Amino acid sequence: MLLKKRQRDDVEIEGSSMADIAFLLLIFFLVVTTIDVDTGIGLVLPPIPDDVEPPPIHERNMLRILVDAQGRVLLDDQPTSIPEVKDRVINFIDNPTNDPNLSESPQDAVVSIMTSRQTPYNVYIDMLDEVVGAYRELRNTASMDRFGIPYNALEDNSIQQEQIQALYPMQISIAEPDEG
Amino acid sequence: MSKFQKKSANTKESIPTSALPDIIFMLLIFFMVVTVLREVELLVQIEFAQAENIEKIEQKRLVSYIYIGPERLGGGELGDTRVQIDDALIDDMGAIRQIMYDKLMEEHRLIVSLRVDRDSEFGIVTDVQQELRHAGTLRINYSTLRQH
């Protein structure tokens, strides 16, 4: 009796079809996989204002961008074409000539964006793209000057990155929508 | 003739395939890890806007999507601009607040990705943004493709 049992010990599970099963699963996952990365323009919305009045911002420190219903872009009430926006924003933030109408320092500069209900979305995105591009260029220049490497190459949450961010804080504010 | 036969008869030339399942399993596990199963069925038509200065969202599990675009009607026709969250179209804008607040309670670092059709008007996006502000989900991301 015992002997007989021992003899059956060398029975093996057939493992050759394992590869086929794995292949099948592999092909399934290959088909359903989409390795697309989400890309987009990040923004932080302003919180709903409390009863406390927010500290006033000097007029010179605020760049008001209005995108109207026809898709025209107005910077401080001056009509501007989309490709010009970037240079205007850079000039406003950095203010190399110490113009009394432009921001006191990059840390004080606030870009305020206003839209109307009929503003075309793609014009809004194009405009926002330019503004973000302006900040990116300023940060890049500062990073090259200080550390000799582009801003993108800085490690996330490193001291250098925080320095640059403190130098050029991205202060984009969405203006309160007006009724109607 | 006999010379050839002898050669092929005496040597065993098969490639060892015992490691094959392991290799396949490794590939399998890789794809299982990177796979994101298509999460929702889109009820609205969305054509992404394009931009140059975009950033990647690395942590996909933090992201919650809001779709805004013309509703897909039968037969390839498009209706009015609607808002879709998860699998449902939103009829009452005020409902967004509660939905997003609940999501924020589950994940405090929530990023709301707004996937908006490029031809929509900004008014509806403003409405959604106002609801997001009331819900306290302030980190948003306008989904755009890279401009070529």
Image (cartoon, grey):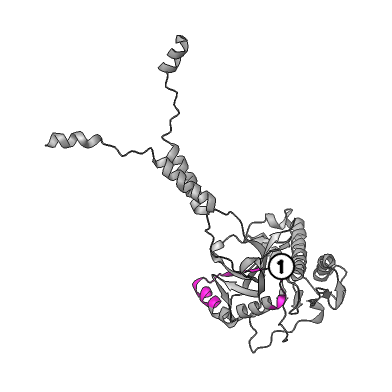
> Height in image: B43 above or below B95?
above
Taking depth in this image into account, of B113 and B4 the one nearest to the observer is: B4
Residue at 47%, 10% in the rendered image: B1
Q: Which residue is mark 1?
A: B118
Residue drawn at the location 48% of the way across and 47% of the way down: A26
Image side of residue B19 versus residue B48, left or right: left
* Residue B127, horizontal then vertical, whole percent: 66, 80
Residue drawn at 61 percent across, 68 percent down: B74
Of residues B105 and B30, which is closer to you in this image? B30
**Location of residue A11 in the rendering, given as x and y in whole percent from the top left corner:** 26, 36
Toward which corner of the image does residue A99 lie, by quadrant?
bottom right
Which residue is situated farthest in the left direction here?
Answer: A1
Residue that sits furthest to the front in the current view: B75
Residue A93 appears in which quarter of the rendering? bottom right
| Residue for point 73% across, 71% down | A121
Q: From the image, which quarter does the C terminus of chain A lie in?
A: bottom right
Q: Amino acid at mark 1?
A: Arg
- Residue B86 on the magenta span: no
For residue A165, what is the image quadrant? bottom right
For the magenta stretch, what is the residue range?
B99-123
* Local SS, label 1: loop
